[in-house]
Amino acid sequence: MAYNDARTSPSAVTGQTTGVSTNKVLRNTYALLAMTLLFSAVTAGAAMSMGVERMNIFVFFIGAYGLMFLVHKTANSAIGLLSTFAFTGFMGFTLGPILSAYLALPNGASLIMTAFAMTGATFIGLSAVALISKKDFSFLGNFLLAGAIVLILAMVVGLVFNIAALSLMVSAGFVLFSSAVILYQTSEIVHRAGETNYILATITLYVSIYNLFISLLSLLGVMNSD
């Protein structure tokens, strides 16, 4: 007797395999992301306890982009995990002096905790939207490319001419940009398995969270009367 059993059809097997693969990438990504964020907190605390001064902007860019390049080069090997922790540890270390500067303000601790809470709530909320709604946010790809170019140019102009209002706009732009990246990256994992490497997915989300936190902290600092 011939019959069509969807449970054993090639398309059903492929769909099940894709679903398992997607869930695995998500689990690995969130697990590694949690560990890297914790490691960054440790290195930030170390920098604060050592009294490290704020890093030169050019040294920061060389270190950050150099280590990020290393992560992308080693993402498909076991060394990729070491590169990931080296990058996130460096980013956490550079965050220490910034946090120390804010803690010197009368309500600095409150500003930091507010920015931290807002960052966490934003990440959880946007991730939930992408996972629960299952909406495809791939259309954000072109927007992110254009947004990255605009933000980089604005940062360069702000550094050269030291325009306070432009710096404020850049911070607000990074809040929107980072939020869009979180939606896009999570959607890429869920829908087309567009990002099957959890190390690269982790780095993308980590950078988005880092920029989101720094930008929110900057905006809150501007609104601070002190």
Image (cartoon, rainbow, N blue to C red):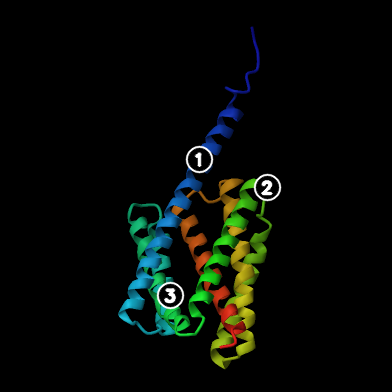
Q: Is residue 134 visible?
A: no
Please tell me which residue is depicted at 61% across the width and 48% down the height of the picture.
131
Can you identify the residue that label 1 sits on? 21
Could you tell which of marks 2 and 1 lies nearer the N-terminus?
1
How many residues crowd mark 2 within 10 Å: few (<14), some (14–19), many (20+)?
Answer: few
Q: In this orientation, which residue lies closer to the viewer: 136 or 55? A: 55
Residue 37, by quadrant, is bottom left
Please tell me which residue is depicted at 57% across the width and 92% down the height of the picture.
162
Label 1 residue SS:
helix
Mark 3 and mark 2: Cα distance apart in space: 34 Å
Residue 178, by quadrant, is bottom right
Could you tell which of marks 1 and 3 lies nearer the N-terminus?
1
Classify the position of the N terminus by image quarter: top right
Label 3 residue SS:
helix
How many residues crowd mark 3 within 10 Å: few (<14), some (14–19), many (20+)?
Answer: many
Q: Is residue 205 above or below residue 192?
A: below
Label 2 residue SS:
helix
- Residue 4 position, x and y percent, is 65, 17
Please tell me which residue is depicted at 56% across the width and 46% down the height of the picture.
193
Q: In this orientation, which residue lies closer to the viewer: 219 or 7? A: 219
Farthest residue to the left: give it: 50
Classify the position of the C terminus by image quarter: bottom right
Q: Is residue 71 visible?
A: yes
Can you identify the residue that label 2 sits on? 133
Farthest residue to the bottom: give it: 161
Please tell me which residue is depicted at 64% across the width and 69% down the height of the picture.
176
